[in-house]
Every structure is written in C-alpha cells, then in structure tokens.
Image (cartoon, rainbow, N blue to C red):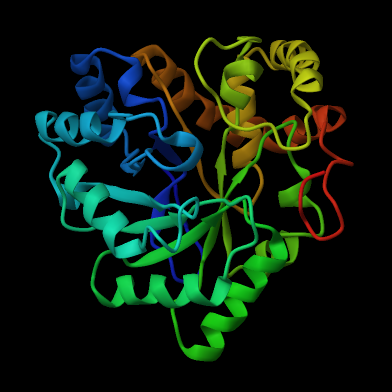
Amino acid sequence: MPQRKLGADGPLVPVYGLGSWNTWDRMEFDDAVGILRRSVDAGVNFFDVAHYNMGPHAEQSKTDLIFGKAIREAGIAREDYLLCGKLWLWEYPAAGFAAQLNESLDRVGVDKADLVVVGDYMERPDVRAIVTEVAEQVRAGRFDAWGVNNWIAADLHQAIDFARAEGLPAPCFAQLKYSVVRRTMAEGPFYQELFDSGSFAMQASDILEGGILAGKLHPQRKIGADPGGIRGEIREAAAELAEVAASFNTTAPQLALAFCLANPAVANVLFGVSRREQLEDNLAALELYHRHGSAIREAVQHLWVDRNKVQADGSWL
C-alpha cells in the first residue's frame, strides 16, 4: 500500500483510510471484524473514528464502540494502526477538548489517538482559543498532530500563523469534501497555496457523495451535508460518471478513487464500506490510478459541479 506524508508535521499514512460515520454500524459485527483484518493486511491501517453525538450528529451512534470492539476481536494491536479522532466545535467551548477526548478515547478503548481533526462549524470560531487548547492536548500526549474539517480557508491561515508565532503545533492537513464533482474548495484559490507549499496536505472525504456517485441516487441512510445546494446536479452527474468509468473499463467508485489519488495534494482518501466486495473494489483502484490517473482527471473535467458555489472568502454560497 503506497504511503504519503500527511503534511510536514504529520505521519506517513496509507493512501487509503476507512472512515467511521455510518460505517461500522451498517454491517454485521463479524463482517466488521473481517473487513478490519483484511484492511490492515492490505496496508490500509488508517481509521477515522469519532464519537458522533454532538450538534447535528446527536443521535447516540454506536459506530465508535463497535469499531473498538471489532478491532480487538480482529487481533490488531494498537501499534499496528493509526487512529484519527474528531474534536467537535458544535458545543465548544462548553464541551472542551479534554472532556471530548476522554469520552471518545474511552469509547474506543485506547489511551490516545495519533491524530485528530477539529470539526467544521456554523459560526466562525475563536481560532486562537482552538489552537491553544489543541496544543494543550498534544502536550498531554492525547495525540501527535492535527488537522481541520471543511474550515473557511481564512480561518485555517489564521490558525497556522498563530500557531507558528506562538511556537504551538499547527494544523498540517485538511479533511475536505473532495470528489469529481466537488473541487473548488481544494483546487481553487482557497487551499491551493497551502497544498502547493508541500507542508500541508489534503485528506479527501465524501468522495462518492454518500453513495450517489456510485449510482445510489437517493440513499436511504443519512449522508453528509450539501454545501452549495448542488445535490440535484450531482445526481445528474452520476450517470455521466458511470459512462466515463465504462470507457476506462472500470466502476464509478474506482474512477472516483483514482481521480482523488491523482491529485498530488491528497495524502489519503477516506471511504466507508459495508461489504468486503466494496473494499476489494476500492483496493483495485490503485492500479487504475497508476495506469490512467492523469487521463481520468482530464476525462471528468466537465463534471466539476461546484465551480461557482464558493464565495471570495472561501465560504459556501
């Protein structure tokens, strides 16, 4: 499994990672154990796992509890995988980072994470307070490096500048909605300067738009937010994506993965699976990327749906 650096201050990570939202609670427990074992054996030992019970996700999800139990059942030692947690801003600062970590790590059954992602927000946050409190948790040994999730680029720049000025750990990666259809935040003027510097990396998430780009046009489960209100256009693009995939003799999910991997800013790609076959299909996309990465990016250029949906400050319309 190829590895890439997750920003200047981040670790080497496999180019694939398994995400946790609505992942481990969408399958039988024995299937979760088998998928985790197969993933680590294939070199996919990066897991994005969070306690989703805050703000719009306050639904008593058990996916993190299931993950912790399943990875132990699979016989995977803690030192053999990377754990990326989440810190939420929905109820911050009332729900401080120390308390959030205590609960989330306890639910998984570990002492520390390797990385955390500071979650997205509805109201502009106190960036300096966030950077300062994150640094306290790094010093306490709760995790080693951190990133942000779908932040406005101006706030991210402020976080980096403040951290460097104060000698504190700076965010080294951004977990962004990034796909064939959602590209402007990552490839526009908002984050591109940071990615071009080589010191900052992208973690691509929601690459199939909750399954829509895989042909499940109206998912029955809850899926991610729709910044820019473009989901109708994305459903229309799904059919075209399938046609492009057929021209490469592959599947739409494999094409979507290869597209992300072909962007040098992408350190790793997060995906969720509920069946072993889906995992194997995703693993096979590596060969497609190596053979046709550049050609695939050119072939889907016309499917860039959110091109005019981001404002000058980097926030969604």
Rendering quarter of residue 96: bottom left
Say left or right for 149 vs 195: left
Q: Quadrant of the C terminus?
A: top right
Q: Number of labelled discs?
A: 0
Q: Establish if 35 lies above or below 206.
A: above
Q: Quadrant of residue 26?
A: top left
Q: Is residue 158 above or below residue 303?
A: below
Q: Position of residue 204 (x, y in %)?
A: 57, 43
Instruction: Pick the residue in front: 229 or 11.
Output: 229
- Judge from the rendering whether residue 183 lies leftward or rightward of residue 33; answer left or right: right
Locate residue 45 relative to residue 163 in the image: left or right. left
**Residue 51 at x, y = what percent?**
33, 41
Taking the spot 39% from the left edge, 35% from the top edge, the residue there is 18
**Of residues 21 and 180, the one drawn nearer to the viewer in this rendering:** 21
Which quadrant holds the N terminus? top left
Residue at 76 percent across and 10 percent down: it is: 239
* Residue 278, above or below 126: above
- The picture places residue 13, in percent across and down from the top left corner, at 40, 52
x and y percentages locating residue 252 in the rendered image: 64, 17
Residue ID at (55%, 24%): 223
Is residue 17 visible in this depiction of the protein? Answer: yes
Residue 113 appears in view: no
